[in-house]
Image: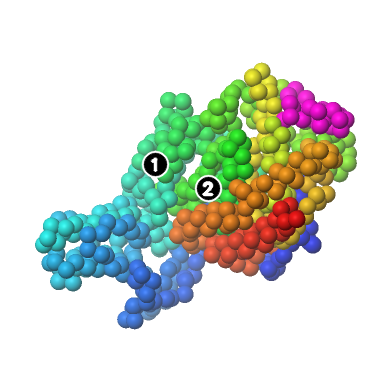
Amino acid sequence: MGTRYSAGAALRTVATLHLLFGAALGLGAGCSGEPRDEGAAPGPDVREDGGVDVAARQVVGLGRGARTDADAPTAPVVVHHDVPCGSNETYWPEEEHEIYWHVQCASPLTKPPALPAGATFDLASGTIAWSPALDQAGPFEIVITDADGGATRISGTVLDRFDAPGNEPLVDPASYLEEHGLPVIHLTWHSDEPMYCKDAVPRDPVPADILVGGVAHPGAELRCRGSTSLAFPKKSFTLRFTSAAPFHAPPSLAAFEGRRRLVLTQTFDDASHVRTRLGFELWNRLDPLNIRIDHASVVVFVDGEYQGLYQLTDNVGDHLMAARGLDKDGNIFKSVSHAGNYRATTNGGAVKPDLTVGYEKSDGEPEDDFSDLTTLLTWVTSSSNDELEASIDSVLRTEDFLDWYVLMTSLVAYDNFAKNSNVYIDSDGPDRRFRYIPWDLNATFGQSWNMQRIVPLALGKDSPSPPAANGIWQRITESPTLLARLHARFAAALSGPMSLGETLALFDQTSEEVRASALRDDRKWDAVRQAYPGWPLLPAVTTFDAERAYVRAWIEERWLYLTSLYVTP
């Protein structure tokens, strides 16, 4: 693993120092870790409209393994919904919650023909009451008719209460399709290695059952992925599908239909749950000709047990190139350490024995042929300024590389200045220019790779840090002509697709989309996150709502600063 960039003490705002005293992680079976939640603070039961029932009983949410006094049994979560007559609403109750639907029709109601097991209907009050058992997670539908022939539909999914003592794995994963509107992906892998995906050892893909939208994918494979993140208790995955059974997408994931490779990225190191998605979406919006990375938020279950909220993205590889209209047989090279800095020397100044040190070839044949990359690096390191200016638009799709600078310096993404970059070339095709594709965007929007805070005013205009980390950027910034193009590109982005208004709207929309699922993820992972020994300067609060507020404020301050530098005269 290469040396990681740090923002430096002067560039971090740290909320608090955490004393690491060997707190137990409470790791469970499979790939999961389970927080030992000793119980949340009680609160009143809540009506659908947000009002408080004055006669409400106290409610409490408990984690698996939580202990209570035998003389003070846990009160259930109680939720009331006022249901307008004739409505057709979707609901997301949890197992063991007490749910009351109050159907409000002027005409007399008739008893529904069918109710879920354990549910009751009071005809006089029009109230359906139900407390689903721990084996009832899955879809439900209740239809109430009135004397006028109208129908009121109450449907949705009973959510798995993963942190309830004695909870059961899902009985029917094939029917468990969504949580709070986000699609669910069910995984089971088959390996003879008992530690597969439980430790930090990289291993080859293994056969896997991958179920999405009720559709199985015969012949699919899976592997746990990552470098630093491979040690996390919440794992990331690469999903592989066959040509005969490519990814079959439900409507909410239609952008991924037919894919052969996909990535599920954990959010253990991103309490906002959206940094990767935001970064890719900004990249997509900067230029419609950029190589697009599709993304979505999903919920993952492994062996019928809840793993939490994930970010689903394209995998940078030959199949993505084909999906983007490029030659799938082209070569893709990835910078896998900070030594892959597009220079002839390391960041410490030592001459590299080979220009290709710090890179791997992720696609293309022969696997050991790095000649295209060597050609690029020789051009970067050996061309005179005049030669580089004259040839850059024939060697690179220059807009890709300018947008790389615009995006990563805007996000203060130190870990992406050179490392985590992909370059693609179709060396025998009609367009033989190098293309850039981003990757691994967790260390963005005000946090470093180890979840330390980075101040929004870091990296001003023409800061020396980015070109010092990236030889291509250095050559661009050394040329007055190319630097002017870069400044114009930056100003156009901040005035258009990456303006403050557009970026905040994107953040708000994406955050609201995932909030309900993120709060469930908090219940499973936040205590584990706080106890994780790899983050000595973790913020004091890492719950979704706190991180959401932090990231939004960071974007606003950062974007105002950048606009003052590049746009405002």
Residue behind mark 2: 311
Q: Is residue 195 visible?
A: no
Residue 356: image location, x then y, percent: 77, 30
Residue 283: image location, x then y, percent: 61, 43
In the rendered view, tell whether residue 438 sits above or below residue 24. above
State whether the magenta stretch is mostly helix, strand or loop. Answer: helix
State yes or no: residue 313 in magenta.
Answer: no
Q: Is 547 left or right of 246, judged from the image as shown?
A: right
Residue 21: image location, x then y, percent: 66, 66
Q: Is 313 left or right of 69, judged from the image as shown?
A: right
In the rendered view, tell whether residue 239 sits above or below residue 234. above
Q: Residue furthest left?
A: 147
Q: Residue at x 19, y 66 (%)?
A: 105
Residue 84: image location, x then y, percent: 25, 64
Q: Residue at x 62, y 36 (%)?
A: 290
Q: Secondary structure at mark 1?
A: helix
Q: Is residue 400 visible?
A: yes
Taking depth in this image into account, of 449 and 64 the one nearest to the observer is: 449
Q: Residue furthest bottom?
A: 54
Taking depth in this image into account, of 537 and 165 the one nearest to the observer is: 537
Label 1 to label 2, Cα distance in Å? Answer: 17 Å
Which amino acid is tagged 1?
Pro
